[in-house]
Image (cartoon, helix red, strand yellow):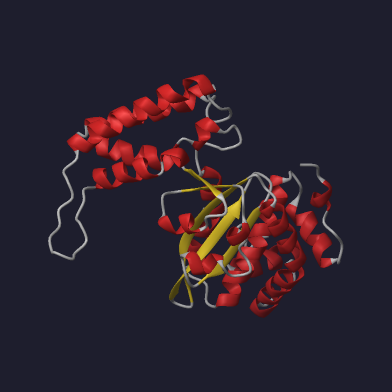
Amino acid sequence: MLHQQCCVPVNKIQQLFHDFFDMSINEGAIYGYQRMAYLRLEAEQAYIHSGLQKSKVVHADESGIRVAQQLHWLHTLGNDRFTLQYVHAKRGYKAHVDSESFLPTFRNYLVHDFWSMYFQFDKCRHAMCGAHILRELNALSEQGQKWAAKFHRFLLDLYYQSDYGRSKIPKRTREQVLAKYQKILRAADKEEPPAVYQYAKGRAKKSKGRNLLERLEKYKEQVLAFAWHEIVPFTNNLAERDIRPVKSKLKVAGCFRALHGAQAYARIHSFISTVRKHQANPFNELVRIFQGEIPLYRAVTT
């Protein structure tokens, strides 16, 4: 709890044990208990994996971390009851075809940003994070793009109409919503400069506004999923909150010295985060894990 969740450095933990209990604990013992927790939490990782695979909505995100001076990625998949995190050397599709991810067989809603990798999983249904879109639109609006300001207001109005993303708008109004959506994009097409091809076989150079415009056109149903379906949230903030603690960890440690340390962090954090989401005490649940017992949070009704 101190080392992984509270991000207390090893030397500070040693000092605390000396001050509180008048006992010494060496660095090897601390890392040994961490390794032991990783092994004993294997069944809990499988339980969390199963719970998320059956979920109607899952949030996805990833963040770069340094492991043994090399760039790796911490991937997170979660909902309001479970958190699943794991470390992989790759950021993209290959990381999710490994056994720790269930995305290749997931069939329900996956909430994420516009990163194209997620769309390679075609068995599930996709929903875009509205907060990401609003931030991009706001940046363009500050640069003077009028269509961006209009689409920002349009998306926020739809957010309010859907009771802050907690319900869906009436079916009778959907045609009007789609018509307004397309009207703003047509205005954007006129306002944004066209793509410029610098070489005959080169990739077209596009403005940030045109790139966003094309994504909004291509993924129209995914952008509006929160308004069409009651179970789909407006943002992917849940995944961002789940993955944020690793940044605090890295500020203290700088990096993970070895891959097994990063893997241990991901599994232990997955468990602690899941227990907290069930309103249970993570310290008591870790004690039960070390005693070979089934943790009580599993009995909490969903």
Question: 291 or 267: nearer the eye?
Answer: 267
Reply above or below: 190 against 210: above
Quadrant including the C terminus = top right
Residue 164 visible? The answer is: yes
Residue drawn at x 38%, y 40% as measured from the top left: 133
Question: 149 or 217: nearer the eye?
Answer: 217
Question: 236 or 147: nearer the eye?
Answer: 147
The quadrant holding residue 265 is bottom right
Residue drawn at x 67%, y 52% as measured from the top left: 52
| Residue 139, image x, y percentages | 28, 40
| Residue 247, image x, y percentages | 49, 58
Question: 51 or 175: nearer the eye?
Answer: 175
Residue drawn at x 56%, y 57% as measured from the top left: 76
The quadrant holding residue 53 is bottom right
Reply above or below: 179 against 222: above
| Residue 127, image x, y percentages | 50, 43
Reply above or below: 60 against 212: below
Reply above or below: 261 against 215: below
